[in-house]
Amino acid sequence: MCRTIMESPCISKHNSSLLVLMMLLSFMVGWIEGVCMEDERKALLEIKASLREIPYFSKSDFLGLSTWVGNGTSGECCDWERITCDPTTGYITDLYLSDITSMEYDDYSYYVRAQTERTWSLNFSSFAHFKELRSLDLSWNYINNTKGLERLESLKKLEILNLSTNYIETNIFPSLGALTSLKILDLSLMNWGRQFPPALDISEFSSLENLELLDLSGCGYNGSFQRQAVDGCSNDEI
């Protein structure tokens, strides 16, 4: 006797629903991959817009960020220059913004004057949107303030921070002490061409248990200095 097994309507409906769900998940993964987050894209455009406030800065100086274009849509900002995104989630993990304020001059005296007056009043709060950021390089930009610097505390995954060669005169150590994932911190020439206050205390760095390299070379220290706070560093340059 031949038996015919007929599929239950309930089972068939279940399989169809499962198939639709799998197709939807596959589509979502494909859509997320390579597409940056909207709040991160807006933050990048805010950073670029702040460059317009720099003295002697012209439209041609945006060549270093020519791909950073806002067109009113989410956009593929993971394809923008100086940026690395996680290929799966789309979150930005690396920002290489070193020397984005540079210019070339035929007249050297004009170059010197422009570099002295051409400071960037960057608002650090824009970087608070990059929750998955691992590396941030802001060296050689002549940043002249610490506005919003405390917002960097939200970057719990930040491992590399380079603030070398800027015009930051205030004590930024308390704001950086909360970045407990830091492995490399470069503050060399951070007060480039100027002087720090007479005494500084880096005891705030005692919480940076993962710190491997601390570079404070060329900072022009001329006061008290507590080195014991970074004795755990495997290779600290001071």
Image: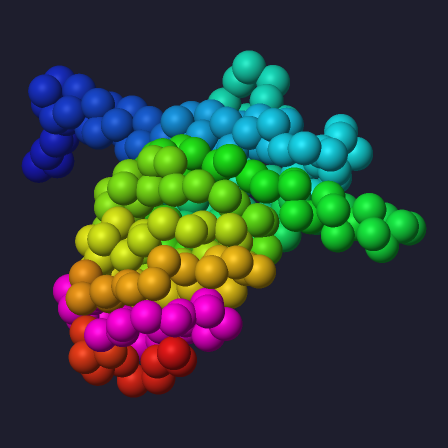
Question: How many numbered discs, if any?
Answer: 0
186, 79: nearer the viewer: 186
Residue 51 picture location, percent across and down: 60, 33
* Residue at image point 37% right, 30% down: 28
Horizontal and vertical percent position of residue 91: 39, 42
Scheme of colours in the image? rainbow
Left/right placement of residue 84 relative to residue 4 reads: right
Q: Is residue 235 magenta?
A: no
Work out whether residue 219 or residue 29 is closer to the camera in this orientation and state it: 219
Most foreground residue, 135 or 25: 135
In this orientation, which residue lies closer to the viewer: 62 or 123?
Answer: 123
The part of the chain drawn in magenta is: 205-226
> Which residue is pictured at 28% across the width and 57% down the height?
173
If the image is split into quadrants, where does the N terminus sit? top left
The residue lying at 24 percent from left, 78 percent from top is 227
Compared to 155, does 185 lie above or below?
below
- Asked if residue 212 lies in the magenta stretch, the reply is yes
The residue positioned 23% from the left and 53% from the top of the image is 174
- Per the picture, the main secondary structure of the magenta-coloured stretch is loop
Task: Say whether residue 61 is visible.
Answer: yes
Q: Indicate whether 74 appears above or below 130.
A: above
Check the image and report above or below for 232 versus 166.
Answer: below
Position of residue 47 in the picture relative to residue 211 (left or right): right
User: Quick check: 217 left or right of 89?
Assistant: right
Q: Quadrant of residue 233?
A: bottom left
